[in-house]
Image (cartoon, rainbow, N blue to C red):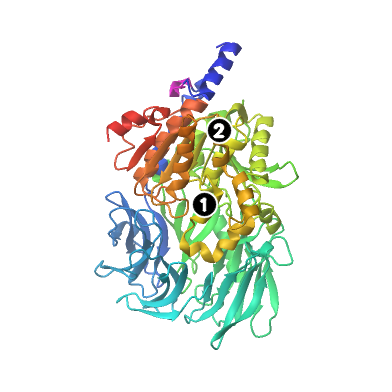
Amino acid sequence: MTKRQNRTALTLIALGLLVLPAWAAPPEARGVPLIPRDVLFGNPDRAGPQISPDGKHLAFLAEVNGVMNVWVAPIDKPDAARAVTKDTKRGIRMYRWAYDNTHILYIQDKDGDENWHVYATNLRNTKTTDLTPIDGVQARIEEVGERFPDEILVLLNDRDKSLHDVYRVNIATAERRLIQKNTGFLGFVTDDDYNVRFASRMLPDGSMEVLKPQEDNWTLFTSIPAEDALSTNILGFDKSGKTLYIEDSRGRNTSGLFALNLATNEKKLLASDDRADVGAVLRHPTEKTIQAVNCEYDRRRWIVVDPQIGSDLEFLKTVNPGDVLITSRSLDDKNWIVAFVVDDGPVRYYHYTRPDRKTRFLFTNRRKLEGLPLAKMHPVVIKSRDGLNLVSFLSLPVWTDPKHTGRPNEPVPMVLLVHGGPWARDTWGLDGMHQWLANRGYAVLSVNFRGSTGLGKSFANAGNLEWAGRMHDDLVDAVKWAEKEKIADPKRVAIMGGSYGGYSTLVGLTFTPELFACGVDIVGPSNLITLLNSIPPYWKPMLDLFTTRVGDHRTDEGRKLLSERSPLTYVERIQRPLLIGQGANDPRVKQAESDQIVKAMQDKKIPVTYVLFSDEGHGFARPENRLAFNAAAEAFLARHLGGRSEPIGDDFKGSTIKAPEGAEGVPGLADALKKM
């Protein structure tokens, strides 16, 4: 192909008029097989293992007739596991042991509506009881304590949809008793005796107050300025209830782990990192003391607080490559379940017995990934235009980077994958989206833009009122960096993401309409005013988090800013192809957010492809729907970036996917829908 022909082809690709089939990939890619989507996005083989409090049994998640359920086995015979729960539709994603060693607790909603119910399954007879059988009400597990093995604390918004009261619930009988009415609080802090020790509330300026009960009233315990509200949290008590552990960024940039003596008010710094906030902690299962804390800048790093656990962590480093995570511990602390996380293989789980320092391999979460040509994830730090460090992660097609240098042998198409939140962050490890896109021939770049959490309060607060402003500038700077480093082909860069990442996709196509070749928006808001006007009622106690950091929809000045930062305002600017995915039951970003931008594009005669799932909420939980959407997205990206593509095939089977608009914009979509 001549240079002129190549330029013409790239122009046609950008306009969506030319589809590059899989065989158009570079010759060196032909020896690298396409990894089937179901291997990456189908249900894992086994996941989330947890040891019972008495150390005798192992629970984990695995399929029953294609739906994730809880299985239980003797700890020394994991292959003798039996399914104990009976979910038949949505699949169980979160569960835990009750301290009676006889019940499994889990939560489930209906079609993604996030009105969670709490269930308890009796292992002796596999009977499951709905502990919160109230339709249209959201339940949350607040506390599961060893001192009351037959009871748990549950939060319910049955009295007032915007406020969760605290109930004490018997897990065998479902009998519940109100112990704390919520009179306007964001949340509560309870102890092992199921006492409510603190309550928090947000103030109009975005700051917070922590209060303690005193007789029939509440008195101020401490104040948290707005600048520290995302990085200062109460973590709990020790066994005595006299020492309080706090993640605290007040008076510093990155949060540290502190122990506060409640009798003397003496505050002691236990651990900190100059580059990252404190994250996950390891707590002794009965003493409840914090023994180690994880601080993550570009990779996980454990800081040992209790020397008794230090030698265990050092030993575990020798067992298997990867970052060490302790997922579960027995009450006597003799048995641990340990996960080893790598970037180019499945998670490996081990049973570790502390007394004899022995480990026994249990299983990987996705055995079909073993031996496949998976990409490395390279941590990179990119400078923003105003000097901020943007901690980012880059994956490349394996045939373009055989020596794992983090630089391809020539520029390749790239997908900028934007995380949701935005008060969250990207991390290192195995990432199905990165592996999928890299295997299809794309560089994949995930950027912790300003406003992301975990990297110090200055970085998080730099995103205040910067939606579609400097937060988007950071993403643009990252793309420009990738182009300058000869990683990305400037004419073939896509933007893709969910939630805030979906919003960023819409921003990318409206605020910088010529930068991206196409965009994939998953449950992203299009109008910040309608977004804030339609938040779930139980988010109202933290409404000021949004108004101070995004914009205030209650004032003329705030509405002006929000309108200026809303992609819907600039629909006519969209020049590049757009794919939108939405769950019909999304309580956070309502279907109306996608409907209104699709309609606006229709009115302007701008093509758009819109796919909708009737049984999903904020994202796609059912594997059938994940596979269906990603099949459509893969064909869409192949059309506009020229990467490899696995045919849609049977990936719509069992899905509720519909295409209210623009099915012709994705190769094979219309035909696949007709076959459903």
* Mark 1, other Cα within 10 Å: few <14 / some 14–19 / many ≥20: some
Residue 473 lies, with reference to residue 302, above or below; the image says above
Taking the image as shown, residue 267 lies to the left or right of residue 610, namely: right
Image quarter hosting the N terminus: top right
Is residue 615 at all visible to an observer of this figure?
A: yes
SS for tag 1? Answer: helix
Q: Nearer the viewer, residue 607 or 361?
A: 607
Residue 509 lies, with reference to residue 6, above or below; the image says below
The residue carrying mark 1 is: 531
- Name the N-terminal-most of marks 2 and 1: 1
Residue 401 lies, with reference to residue 128, above or below; the image says above
Residue type at mark 1 is Leu
Residue at (27, 59) in percent of width and height: 86
The residue carrying mark 2 is: 572
Image quarter hosting the C terminus: top left
Q: Is residue 157 magenta?
A: no
Residue at (36, 63) in percent of width and height: 136
Q: CA distance from mark 2 to mark 1?
A: 21 Å
Task: Return the residue found at the far front.
Answer: 556
Residue at (38, 53) in percent of width and height: 46
SS for tag 2? Answer: helix
- Residue 401, how many percent across, how many down? 58, 31
The magenta segment = 19-24
